[in-house]
Image (spheres, rainbow, N blue to C red):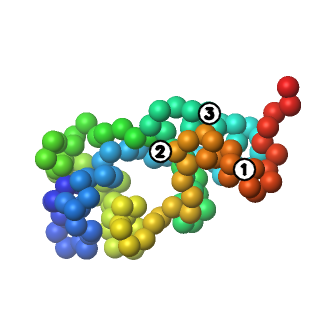
Amino acid sequence: MGKQKDSGKAQPDCGQCDSLCCRYVATQIDTPTCKKDYDHIRWYLLHQKCHVFEDEHGDWFLEVAVRCKALREDGLCDYYEQRPKICRRHGETGENCEFDPTSSPYRRRFSDVTEFEDYLERKGVDWRWKR
């Protein structure tokens, strides 16, 4: 993203956040409802650079902290004119930029398996498998 803008579209000042949206990939996962789901999330969180979050709409995502290959050292996109639509739409009016300092799109976010297990314990969820 960097400091470039699509003409005619209101977008956040991407140059202010060091192109953070270009430093991860997130994909939606099923909302956890059973031991198998909880176990999958625990497995994700045992891997380096993996996070799981629930967004403000209640949707769950797996996030992997990995830098886009097109992101230049100066924070601009080397593939800007041909970038995918998901990049073009990021931060458009009506969408929350997850790095907006005035609000957070996360209902909850986990970076560590113990954070998630503590969350399940506080909610009284039976997540442990019997041996």
- The residue indicated by pointer 1 is 120
Q: Is residue 68 left or right of residue 44?
A: left
Q: Secondary structure at mark 3?
A: helix
* Label 2, label 1: how far apart the Cα atoms are: 19 Å
Q: Residue at x 47, y 33 (%)?
A: 48
Q: Secondary structure at mark 2?
A: strand
Q: Amino acid at mark 2?
A: Glu
* Label 2, label 3: how far apart the Cα atoms are: 13 Å
Q: Residue at x 79, y 50 (%)?
A: 125
Whether residue 98 is visible to the viewer of this picture, yes or no, is: yes
Q: Earlier in the sequence, mark 1 or mark 3?
A: 3
Quarter of the picture holding the C terminus: top right
Q: Amino acid at mark 3?
A: Trp
Q: Earlier in the sequence, mark 2 or mark 3?
A: 3
Return the x and y of residue 55 as percentages of the image width and height: 54, 60
Q: Residues within 10 Å of mark 1 (few under 14, many from 20)?
A: some
Q: Earlier in the sequence, mark 2 or mark 1?
A: 2
Q: Which numbered circle lies on residue 109?
A: none
Q: Is residue 116 above or below residue 122?
A: above
- The residue indicated by pointer 3 is 43
Foreground of the two, 116 or 14: 116
Return the x and y of residue 100 as percentages of the image width and height: 35, 67
Q: Is residue 41 left or right of residue 56?
A: right
* Label 1, label 3: how far apart the Cα atoms are: 15 Å
Q: Which numbered circle lies on residue 63?
A: 2
The quarter of the picture where residue 66 lies is top left
Return the x and y of residue 118 as percentages of the image width and height: 68, 48
